[in-house]
Image (spheres, rainbow, N blue to C red):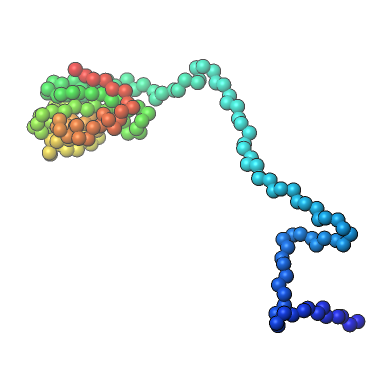
Amino acid sequence: MATKKKSTKTMGGRTPARKKTAGKKAPTGKGKAPARKAPARKKATLKPPARKKAKLPAALAQKAGPAENPAAKALAHRIAQLLLDKKAEDVVILDVRGMTSYADYFVIASAESDRQVSAMAENVQVQLKTGEEVQRPIGTEGLETGQWVLLDYGEVVAHLFLTDLRAHYDLEGLWADAAREKVA
């Protein structure tokens, strides 16, 4: 069976360009107009169904704070009193339970000279080593310089500053959310 080749008319050696139709069918010779497409619709974004919050009993709905630690609180007050015995200024106890994993209370105090800061730190260490309950610090820092002395007693950390350095480092501002107790 022989096939016939379609002949194309050329215009100066070129074939005429055909118009491309995007998905449209050529109209049939029956006189009907081509069917119109429906306008494109925007895809609706699906939102997850709203969940209803389960109501808890009033006792459970209140936020349960960290457990009270009376031994740590007593130690913090004892350290604060020992600092006051050496004329510490502006002694503050910060309750950082639930805010930090390494301590429950911070005791912050300041003094006017590095010798006084060192004397306060030495008094706290000596007095806590003697007595009914012997307390030894886990770590100490800054005893050599006496500008910022840190005494770490586990659940209680004491920060003893020169007055200018205390204002510079502003630990109270850093722990602004912590409950504070000024000791006089």
Q: Residue furthest right?
A: 1
Say left or right for 160 vs 50: left
Q: Nearer the viewer, residue 118 or 11?
A: 11
| Residue 6 image point, x, y percent | 82, 78
Position of the C terminus, as image quadrant, is: top left
Count of picture labels: 0
At 20% from the left and 35% from the top, the residue drawn is 168
Whether residue 154 is visible here, answered yes or no, is no
At 20% from the left and 23% from the top, the residue drawn is 91
| Residue 151 image point, x, y percent | 21, 32
| Residue 181 image point, x, y percent | 26, 20
At 47% from the left and 20% from the top, the residue drawn is 62
Whether residue 176 is visible here, answered yes or no, is yes
Q: Quadrant of residue 90?
A: top left
Q: Nearer the viewer, residue 173 or 2?
A: 2
Q: Nearer the viewer, residue 168 or 24?
A: 24
Give above or below for 62 relative to 45.
Answer: above
Give above or below for 28 relative to 154.
Answer: below
At 41% from the left and 23% from the top, the residue drawn is 65
Q: Quadrant of residue 17?
A: bottom right
| Residue 130 image point, x, y percent | 17, 24
Say left or right for 4 vs 59: right
